[in-house]
Amino acid sequence: MRKEILIAIFFGITIGLILAFGIWRTNSSLKDNISQTADENRTVETEATAENSTFSINSPQDYDVITQNPVVISGISGQETLLVISTENEDFIRNLSNNQEFEAEISLEPAVNVIKFTSFNSGGISAEKLFTLVYSSEFRKETEESVSKPADESDATTSVRQKVQEKLQLALNRPKAVIGALTDISDSGIQIRNDLGQIDQVAIDEAVSYARINDTTASLKFSDLALGDHIVSMGYYDDNEVLLARRILVTEPKTPPDITIVYGSVTDVSGRIITIESGGIETELTFPRRWKGPEINEINIDDIVVAVYTTTNETQTIRTIEILFPTPTPEE
């Protein structure tokens, strides 16, 4: 009897272990599948997000210093079918359905220009990029003067060689700008905290010129700089990623264009009010006295349009509108 009990206990423990092992393997497999599915979903989501904005800007580059105005911005699209380029006062709409290359001639304001790029793919999904250019008509003059001062007779040979090297370096490098709050001042340089919260090093010498730009422009001296000033430093990067400044501005921070874009089908035109449906949402826009685009009587129901508008006191006012695909005219 005792032997039979021991055998029964042994078989019971064995069966229990087998069942427990089977349950563990099943749970482990389920967890692996769930984890793999989650990873795949994250990958798909990341790829989809990346595909929202696939255009590239070839020229100029972000934070370039521009010395001639206007400037032509050019690039090439990837998955986008529509691109809207917006400055503080103007919009440029580019239909990319048949041509992947795009360009726009843009007039810049003195100092900082924040340009907003809004792209749409074939599914109507939009993405935004901000692009910063600094326009300074004085920068080239200041730079040329700093490398063309006459050399002292005592070290003429060395000075000439140095000036030639500086000119070659300026020719090879693209002038760049560092923008942000002034956080530290020393005899040989300053530190600037940029919009990303990073600290940029800027080297200065006696060749740097200074100015304050608000509604007017006023000359400054190095001693006029104060911690907390919003600084625009223009110059050239050396091999250590230190900006060798040639001109420094004190100005107010610049914000992106305060605009909204709707891309969809016209559902109603009543007087100076147009209704555009996009993604099941209707947007009512008002035409002001002046706008960029076709006249109101040239816009028809079911036209596919893109409109750039501003909002003031809950009134949405058109700034720019363009007909992308007009409604076909019935044959007579």
Image (tube, grey):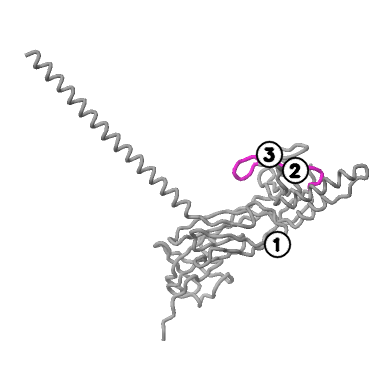
Q: Main secondary structure of the magenta part?
A: loop
- Name which residue lies at 47% across and 72% down: 325
Residue 69 marker? 1
Q: Amino acid at mark 3?
A: Thr
The tag earlier along the polypeptide, 2 or 1, is: 1
* Residue at the disc numbered 3: 183
Q: Work out which residue is located at the far right of the displayed protein and give it.
A: 153
Q: Is residue 157 above or below residue 323?
A: above
Residue 283 marker? none
- Name which residue lies at 11% across and 20% down: 8
Q: What secondary structure is marked by label 3?
A: strand
Which of these two is toward me, 106 or 227?
A: 106
Residue 225 marker? 2
**Magenta region, residue range:** 193-208
Q: Position of residue 58 (x, y in %)?
A: 61, 57
Q: Work out which residue is located at the far bottom of the displayed protein and give it.
A: 332
Disc 1 residue crowd, few under 14, some 14–19, many 20+, Cα 10 Å: some
- Name which residue lies at 59% across and 54% down: 256
- Name which residue lies at 72% across and 60% down: 68
